[in-house]
């Protein structure tokens, strides 16, 4: 029996979404929804959150150490902010690192979006003061997170546990990313090993964000990846590896709801 | 043929995750990972981001209007901050509303976490200055978002399009939430109707967050829902409605990897 959710079949849901916007994939969502002329209109002054190039390894170590008391989002913030306190000072000294802790565990433990990226994104957004640049960096960060074997960071002194595996998340979604690593490592969620993995991963993400901001500080940052909505073919704000999470009832770009239903 | 992802079967992935931590569901993830004594140790001073009770309807209207130039996350922030400028002033006057715009579309268009909740969460985190309270409010906000028929907000003056449907997202994940509404309404992503829906939804979320902060300002805020990690049974930071997104190969709490594999 086909599964139905709130009166809508899951299969029909996904397929309809694909059908309705067939051919629209080459359009930029931004182009339609936002006046491009206004895209750079809102600026952070930069007076409050000055940036200077940071030591990437130190950011990693601080992030790693902070994970065990602050979790993913605020540990990534701490790694960057503690270095900014040391090298810049000013308003960074009173930065509310833990005001963003609720981003942990994919939104207060809901498992949706890994907190490392929005954590680092908070600093990227405040520092760059330009919505296009921040968007490009966060997009690159999501590609790095999703398609790199992680964690590669190795702490100078291991706090919780040795771990063996690196995995490719395939998505920025917390519970998928964590689950894939747990399966590879053969451990459960409430283990020192899993905490160690997330701590090292947070270090990797804070370090990658720092590399981007360091390049930006030199005037050399260039986006590595196109915005996802310019390259996907399934007509909604998403990745295009639908089956990776949703199983078999997802159409390829050449399939339609009608042909699959029959 | 069973689908395999990076050498790990999707089925095995999900089932293993369930098996490894069977029986651990009643534990609090927070209890193991974070010293409870430190949970209130990091405070925002409250000096910078003072709060006074806001007009909920005005927050909704401002959020709605801002959506069409700032998207979901920064429009929710704008709705709350513009009212805080009017009623409190001070450092709210220079608040970098668009420093968080990259949260839109589930993280720069990746479709992961709807930007309305982290947008509102930024203000909740800065205002409350207490990690436990912020976490509870964001958790309540995720429940409201996921299990309420939305959007219920009706603007005084419609900007883009009349719309007919309200839907239950079932999740805080952007592309699932948007896709369910698109299917109900029978429209594609790049339409005025879809933009109108997300604008109204952003208004609803900013309004709900404002209601919580207003209650908190009166000393009357009480969490409505337990943290999700205290009630789920599948041993990872996630909701417990696995099949809702993942299809049929997800175990109930009484099933195991072995029994299902045979």
Image: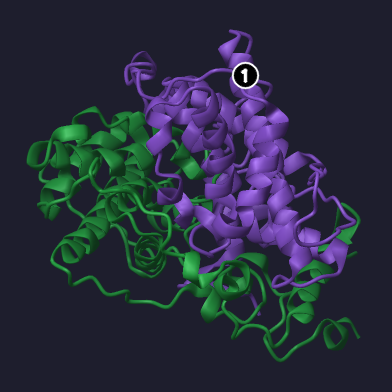
Chain colours: A green, B purple
Q: Which residue is mark 1?
A: B214
B90 lies above or below B193: above
Seen in the image, is A208 located left or right of residue B27? Answer: left
| Quadrant hosting residue A233 | bottom right
Q: Is residue B253 visible?
A: no
Return the residue found at the far bottom: A254
Residue pictured at 19% horizontal, 49% vertical:
A60
Seen in the image, is B232 located left or right of residue A137? Answer: right
B220 lies above or below A51: above
Observer-nearest of B137 and B48 = B48
Observer-nearest of B192 and A234 = B192
Residue pictured at 75% horizontal, 55% vertical:
B197
Give percent across and percent down for residue A174. 49, 51
Residue pictured at 47% horizontal, 21% vertical:
B128
Give percent across and percent down for residue B201. 71, 47
Q: Quadrant of the C terminus of chain A?
A: bottom right
A72 lies above or below A148: above
């Amino acid at each position: 029996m086909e599964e139905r959710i709130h009166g809508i079949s899951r299969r029909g849901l996904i397929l309809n979404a694909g059908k309705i916007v067939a051919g629209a994939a080459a359009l930029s969502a931004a182009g339609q929804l936002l006046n491009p002329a206004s895209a750079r209109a809102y600026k952070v002054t930069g007076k409050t959150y000055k940036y200077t190039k940071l030591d990437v390894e130190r950011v990693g170590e601080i992030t790693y150490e902070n994970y065990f008391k602050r979790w993913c989002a605020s540990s990534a913030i701490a790694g960057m902010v503690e270095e900014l306190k040391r090298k810049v000072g000013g308003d960074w000294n009173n930065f509310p690192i833990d005001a963003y802790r609720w981003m942990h565990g994919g939104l207060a433990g809901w498992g949706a979006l890994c907190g490392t990226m929005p954590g680092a994104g908070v600093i990227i957004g405040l520092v760059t003061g330009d919505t296009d640049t921040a968007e490009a960096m966060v997009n690159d960060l999501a590609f790095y997170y999703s398609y790199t074997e992680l964690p590669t960071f190795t702490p100078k002194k291991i706090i919780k546990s040795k771990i063996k595996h690196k995995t490719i998340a395939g998505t920025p979604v917390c519970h998928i990313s964590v689950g894939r690593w747990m399966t590879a490592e053969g451990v459960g969620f409430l283990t020192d090993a899993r905490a160690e993995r997330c701590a090292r991963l947070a270090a990797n993400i804070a370090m990658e964000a720092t590399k981007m901001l360091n390049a930006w500080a030199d005037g050399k940052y260039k986006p590595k990846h196109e915005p996802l909505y310019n390259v996907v073919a399934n007509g909604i704000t998403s990745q295009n590896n639908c089956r990776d999470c949703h199983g078999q009832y997802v159409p390829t770009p050449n399939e339609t709801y009608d042909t699959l239903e029959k």
